[in-house]
Amino acid sequence: MSSVSKSPWVIHYDGSSCNGCDIEVLAALTPLYDVERFGIINTGNPKHADIFLVTGSVNEQNIAVIKEIYDQMVEPKVVVACGVCACSGGIFHDCYNVVGGVDKAIPVDVYAPGCAVRPEAIIDAVVQGIGILEQKSAALAAAKKKGA
């Protein structure tokens, strides 16, 4: 799977959604799916997080919050859009205040569509994110080595 030197920590944020995907994110943490078997830890502090898991669409009120959480995360970092609302705006796409999916606010590395997204898809997306995190970490180390 991965040779990341520490367990990846995930921070979860719900944009504007029906909360169906949030329930599935919580289900991924239960013993039935057990996302922690991959060493994944859920945190509430962006400064400790490696992976930003976003559910729900982006609207005019939460776009600043999403950017703030993203900016507080330390490089390298990965963003995972979970659910069709986070991927494209979903059923809320035509609402007057909805901007669209998470990629309208910050760069997204992995998309996990579904309504509601299944826990298996969330786990798969996070594991893909770990691979991307590894690549970004190696690129960051190479750039640091080259600059030193």
Image (cartoon, grey):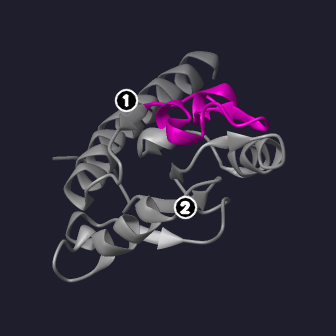
Q: Is residue 52 above or below residue 13?
A: above
Q: Is residue 30 above or below residue 24?
A: below
Left or right: residue 94 versus residue 33 is: right
- Amino acid on which the number 2 mark rests in the picture: Ile
Q: From the viewer's side, name the closer residue of 57 and 140.
A: 57
Is residue 90 covered in magenta?
Answer: yes
| Residue 133 on image: x %, y % | 41, 39
Residue drawn at x 74%, y 42% is 59
Tell me the element at label 2: strand
Find disc 2 in the rendering and name its residue. 11
Residue drawn at x 36%, y 63% is 7
Q: From the viewer's side, name the closer residue of 6 and 130.
A: 130
| Residue 126 on image: x %, y % | 33, 49
| Residue 37 on image: x %, y % | 20, 70
Q: From the viewer's side, name the closer residue of 1 and 86.
A: 86
Can residue 77 be spotted in the picture?
no
Examine the image and state in which quarter residue 38 appears. bottom left
Task: Please provide the residue range marked out in magenta.
Answer: 87-109
Find disc 1 in the rendering and name its residue. 135
Q: Is residue 118 above or below residue 35?
A: above
Tell me the element at label 1: helix
Examine the image and state in which quarter residue 131 appears. top left
Can residue 75 be spotted in the picture?
yes
Q: From the viewer's side, name the closer residue of 67 and 87.
A: 87
Earlier-in-chain disc, 1 versus 2: 2
Total numbered labels:
2
Q: CA distance from mark 1 to mark 2?
A: 20 Å
Quarter of the figure with the C terminus = top right
